[in-house]
């Protein structure tokens, strides 16, 4: 079994993450677990910590990228260096159950699944929010799981999923700065024969102020790369998916609405911003807007509808949607 740990300027978290991984019940009971740490060109003490851990523990393997290339490339390097039958991707600044790996592997063994999805949660300052994963834990095909991903009933996070390593031979590690998890998960599900689920909440994603999902970085290129990866995976499964409501709903959420939010809040000059907004609004059809209504997704219906008819009104709805709430 291989645990993949990409790290960039993670000196505050890496040592603790490695220590907690070494305390996984499967690690304590078996020598067949390797922890693959890849430093993605950090400028802090990440490399020192990773090298020291590898020198101390035989199950820890450390590799360093000389230049920062993004988390997808760091994961690609780690997978290339791994030897386990299954792979679990984690972020070193998060938290997880001590029995997470044992339960994930046991589920994979008992169901002969290529992918196992476990329960997980977002942890915000002051409250927690569970991920919206399927309530039915009956194993399904990879194609069916891919459809759930498009519909938003299965999240595109890597860290609450265990993957058979052989699947990674059939994917590209899309070098997107944001949503690279989604691109990988889509490809891995499309390549899988069988996907299993366990309801136990085994992973906690700690949402921090500097998290990339909350940052104002330029995302246009990344969103395009993710769209291309998901589209290619869909075509590989069945070309008819491209014309489906599921695929349309995915495009509405992750391509058009995410792209508009990025254009309006990201560090673009006026000409770039106008060009991106014009192109995205031209792709936003009423059919796509109504898909949000069909799914009773009222927040995205408001965002999509206002984006279609009035950009100033859309800005107002975006501001309202971004206002913090005490609990979600």
Image (cartoon, helix red, strand yellow):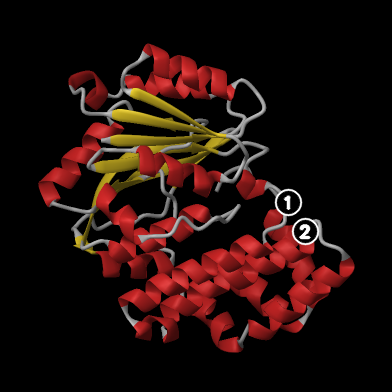
Residue 56 on image: x %, y %: 39, 12
Residue that sits furthest to the top in the current view: 56
Q: Is residue 50 above or below residue 88?
A: above
Query: Label 1: which residue?
Result: 216
Q: Are marks 1 and 2 in contact (CB under 8 Å)?
A: yes
Quadrant assignment for the N terminus: top left
Q: Tell me the tag on residue 265.
A: 2
How far is the residue under mark 1 from the one under mark 2?
A: 6 Å
Q: Is residue 312 above or below residue 326?
A: below
Give the quarter of the image for residue 302. Answer: bottom right
Residue 141 on image: x %, y %: 22, 65
Q: Is residue 242 left or right of residue 175?
A: left
Residue 48 visible, this orientation? yes
Residue 107 on image: x %, y %: 18, 44
Give the quarter of the image for residue 244. Answer: bottom left
Among numbered discs 1 and 2, the one appearing first in the sequence? 1
Give the quarter of the image for residue 26. Answer: top left
* Residue occupying the point 26% across, 64% down: 142
């Amino acid at each position: 079994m291989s645990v993949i740990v990409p790290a960039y300027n993670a000196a505050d978290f890496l040592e603790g993450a490695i220590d907690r991984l070494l305390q996984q019940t499967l690690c304590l009971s078996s020598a067949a677990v390797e922890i693959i740490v890849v430093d993605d060109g950090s400028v802090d003490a990440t490399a020192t910590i990773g090298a020291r851990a590898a020198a101390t523990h035989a199950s820890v393997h450390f590799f360093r990228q000389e230049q920062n290339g993004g988390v997808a490339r760091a994961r690609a390097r780690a997978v290339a260096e791994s030897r386990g039958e299954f792979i679990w991707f984690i972020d070193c600044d998060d938290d997880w159950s001590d029995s997470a790996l044992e339960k994930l592997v046991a589920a994979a063994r008992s169901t002969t699944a290529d992918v196992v999805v476990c329960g997980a949660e977002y942890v915000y300052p002051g409250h927690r929010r569970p991920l919206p994963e399927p309530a039915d834990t009956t194993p399904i095909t990879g194609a069916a799981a891919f459809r759930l991903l498009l519909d938003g009933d299965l999240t595109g996070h890597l860290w609450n999923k265990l993957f058979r390593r052989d699947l990674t031979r059939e994917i590209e590690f899309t070098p997107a700065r944001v949503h690279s998890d989604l691109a990988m998960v889509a490809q891995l599900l499309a390549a899988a024969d069988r996907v299993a689920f366990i309801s136990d909440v085994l992973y906690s994603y700690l949402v921090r102020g500097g998290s990339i999902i909350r940052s104002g970085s330029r995302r246009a290129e990344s969103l395009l790369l993710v769209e291309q990866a998901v589209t290619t995976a869909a075509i590989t499964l069945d070309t008819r998916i491209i014309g489906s409501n599921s695929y349309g709903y995915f495009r509405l959420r992750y391509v058009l609405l995410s792209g508009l939010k990025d254009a309006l809040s990201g560090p673009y000059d006026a000409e770039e911003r106008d060009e991106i907004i014009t192109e995205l609004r031209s792709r936003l059809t009423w059919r796509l807007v109504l898909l949000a209504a069909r799914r009773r997704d009222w927040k995205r219906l408001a965002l999509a509808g206002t984006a279609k008819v009035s950009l100033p009104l859309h800005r107002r709805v975006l501001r309202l949607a971004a206002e913090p709430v005490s609990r979600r």
